[in-house]
Amino acid sequence: MYRREIDPAEYADAIHEMLRRGIFLTSKAGDKVNTMVIGWGHIGRIWEKDVFVAYVRRNRYTHELLDANPEFTVNVPVHGFDPKAFAICGTKSGRDMDKIKEAGLTLAEPQAVSVPAIKEYPLTLECRVIYREEQDASKLPEEIIRKFYSVEKEDHISYYGEIKAAYILEEEKAEILQV
Ligand SMILES: Cc1cc2nc3c(=O)[nH]c(=O)nc-3n(C[C@H](O)[C@H](O)[C@H](O)COP(=O)(O)O)c2cc1C
């Protein structure tokens, strides 16, 4: 695989647009690699760093893995996605199954962090968590509590991941024949 480096700021609009449908956040602790669909998140520049902020509910297996190893990769399905993979990664928990295997996804070696990327969803951000914030429900409007925290009661934890590498995974560049 060939990594075509990108400036994440140039892809912020595209990533935010794709977040409306769902993108993939992968985490890893020990030999466990897991991916989940996320719809909440954004790219920004904070503390003079390019950062991706993800919001992960406390009951997700991903939360457990992120607290054990504060690194993640974000993969954006720029060429579309397999609905089956999306359904598995957006509803099943990695506690109960190997979602990478079940969804038929292929891991790609990371460049700057310990968490692999997903080959099928080639726009990749490799992130290291530099700040983690627990939501304070007492500061949220009642209407939001009712809408988002009355069925699933667990709060969201925001993970601010400094973007350590950003690229698009492409097939190997054709070798130029030497004559
Ligand atoms: C479109 C879509 C967007 C989602 N966005 C989020 C999100 O931003 N944060 C979150 O905690 N869960 C979100 N989920 C739910 C998780 O993907 C789902 O609970 C998943 O099974 C968690 O996997 P895990 O337990 O292996 O971490 C979303 C699901 C879908 C289908």
Image (cartoon, helix red, strand yellow):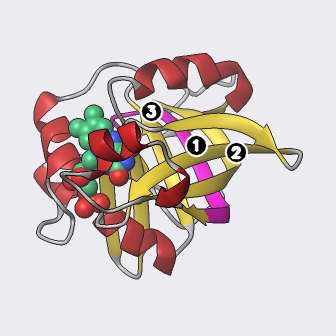
Check disc 1 and report its element: helix, strand or loop: strand
Check disc 3 and report its element: helix, strand or loop: loop
Neighbour class for label 2 at 10 Å: few (<14), some, many (≥20)? many
| First reached walking from the N terminus: tag 3 or tag 2 | 2
Neighbour class for label 3 at 10 Å: few (<14), some, many (≥20)? many
Residue 125 disc label: 1
Neighbour class for label 1 at 10 Å: few (<14), some, many (≥20)? many
Q: Is mark 2 within 8 Å of ligand 1?
A: no
How far is mark 3 from mark 2, CA to CA?
19 Å
Part of the protein shown in magenta: 118-132
Find disc 2 in the rendering and name its residue: 51
Q: Amino acid at mark 2?
A: Val
Q: Position of residue 47 (x, y in %)?
A: 86, 50
Mark 2 or 1: the one toward you: 2
- Whether residues under marks 1 and 3 lie with C-beta atoms below 8 angstroms apart, the answer is no
Per the picture, the main secondary structure of the magenta-coloured stretch is strand
In this rendering, the answer to whether 55 lies above or below 33 is: above
Find disc 3 in the rendering and name its residue: 122
Q: Amino acid at mark 1?
A: Leu
In this rendering, the answer to whether 113 lies above or below 168 is: below
